[in-house]
Image (cartoon, rainbow, N blue to C red):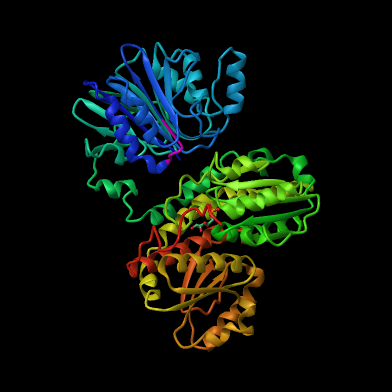
Amino acid sequence: MCGIVGFVGEDENALPFLLEGLQRLEYRGYDSAGVAVVQENHLTVEKRQGKLQRLVEALTTTSVRGSCGIGHTRWATHGRPTDQNAHPQLDCHGQIAVVHNGIIENYQTLKAELMARGHHFRSETDTEVIPHLLEEYGGLDDLKTAVERAEARLTGAYAFLAISATHPDQIVAVRRSSPLVVGLGERTNYLASDFTAFLRHTRRAVVLDNGDLAVIRPWSVEIHDANGVAVERPVLHIDWTLDQAERGGYPHFMLKEIMEQPEAWADCLLGRIERGRVVEEALGLTAEELKAIRRVVMVAAGTAYHAGLVGRVLVESLAGIPVEVDVASEFRYRRPLLEPGTLVVAISQSGETADTLASVSLAKEMGLKVWAVTNTVGSTLAREADTVGYTYAGPEIAVASTKAYTTQILLLTLFAIALAQAQGRAYPELAEQVLSLPEAGKSVLSAMQGLHGLGQELAQHRDVFFIGRGLDWALAQEGQLKLKEISYLHAEAYAAGELKHGTLALIEEGVPVIAILTQPELADKAISNVLEVKARGARVWAVVSANLSGVPADRLIPIPATAPLLAPVLAAIPLQLLAYWTAVSRGEDVDQPRNLAKSVTVE
Ligand code: G6P
């Protein structure tokens, strides 16, 4: 997820607008930023690795004036955060500039083709193929036609803006899956990843549809749909405050990030499953490397550790390879016994957690290979690990992790299938079902309105118990952490079969128990555990897969039926929302809970 902005007007205010717009979009990415402005038939380009402020400082001594320009704030996906990889990306002669959000899946093939035709590439990004394609297709003469032709060559989910030195009064914009909106001003028009960037200037906006190509001039907005037919899109009046707009209209980043999960899952899966097989290289591993793995050790902290607990069940079930999961702060001090043939999987949203990094150093000292699962390109973990699989969830701002967690599970699911493939066992049906999860996620989200009331109810209690078996137990552990960290209620997760060895003593009249039942194989046993707690007076709310019946709960929270191994990502959503609504009911600071930090870079 990156932020893109564009300005085309009759006065020369492009630069101040671009910098202001980027500042509003900084929440979408902040590892580097850049702008390109057309000035007297010449492109002035400035970009800097690091926070936007570095770019602003670099521009204070320049006198860039222009009435057409584009800007970008980056959250790296392809290529580390460096000046060269920052956007805008340019053609060979620096006359066409492009800013881009999303992923161009087939960039390697296109890059090889363009290089063979003599194009000179300067970055490691997927984006750079676009300006070179535009150059190839005559973008300096007719930018719109060149964009149409280039777009026909691209696969992936993205949005981009293109300008050229020879078109000082137009921006050509394309939207395919990634968001893009147009702001309609007085003899000035704006483009941005979301309304926040231009709300201070105009509240009239047009949301581009998937497949739209738009030519924006100071006095006109021309839109063509995916079939090239000229279309009119409705003009909306946006009455959000700036603060609301930054959170996509949601009251908290956590809720926004919960709602973004289907999109994050689609980004995470993009280009990773083809014809029923996981593409090993798209995980950062080769089939040979996978074949050599005899044992897997996962290390992580917090929510990422809980993703590892799910990953263990997936890898052991699908690939039949033994897995250990360890909390990084324990692993690093327990002198682990690691033999050759072990792959260490380090899972971390930020890629900066001190204990996880120390575990990686230890594993490397022992001569083991480390595969990182992280959301942050250019993080210390991504640099220290031998190889990396990115989760592509986009920046996560709320301290309580949601979309990073479910994308970690997705990536571990693909890893488990890839490991099985390496041993000659493919799971084509399962791989295809993985691709349907973003759609299933959308239907879970739209069915969860009622959780608001359950959150209010839960907020009245002091202790909450989460129970489950197998994968559901792994998920229960994340459910209790979510609730605990933002609502400050006391919550515990138990393997449902362990209740009778102690915890059952704590169950009394009215105590809330959240039961998770998504695994048909274990359903009968889990139902007995529900009956056990109910017999002691517990009030049971059950998150249940739609294909399981006869769960004797006080309240059922159904999720769509899917392959049991894929249920955790869907079942995670109601647990996240339950925690969210409980914390809101209690009036707690949802995005920044007391005593906690997003990234723990100290021991
Ligand atoms: C902190 C955060 C958690 C996160 C954990 C691990 O405790 O508050 O949300 O799960 O660190 O962070 P990482 O970036 O390594 O995934």
State the residue in front, 597 or 591: 597
Residue 193 locus on image (x, y percent): 37, 37
State the residue in front, 545 or 295: 295
Q: Residue at x 36, y 71 (%)?
A: 453
Residue 426 visible from this viewpoint: no
Task: State whether residue 590 is above or below residue 370.
Answer: below
Query: In the rendered picture of this protein, how many numbered marks are placed on residues?
Result: 0
Task: State whether residue 226 is above or below residue 275.
Answer: above
Q: Residue at x 40, y 75 (%)?
A: 458
Task: State whether residue 553 is above or below residue 208.
Answer: below
Residue 235 locus on image (x, y percent): 25, 37
Residue 103 visible from this viewpoint: yes
State left or right for residue 65 relative to residue 583.
left
Locate the N terminus and report the quarter of the image it occupies.
top left
Main SS, magenta residues: loop
State the residue in front, 68 or 220: 68
Q: Residue at x 56, y 47 (%)?
A: 351
The quarter holding residue 569 reads bottom right
The quarter holding residue 112 reads top right
State left or right for residue 355 relative to residue 438.
right
Residue 431 locus on image (x, y percent): 64, 49
Residue 191 locus on image (x, y percent): 32, 32
Q: Is residue 456 magenta?
A: no
Please provide the residue range marked out in magenta.
29-33
Q: Residue at x 80, y 49 (%)?
A: 341
The quarter holding residue 148 reads top left
Locate the C terminus and report the quarter of the image it occupies.
bottom right
State the residue in front, 205 or 600: 600
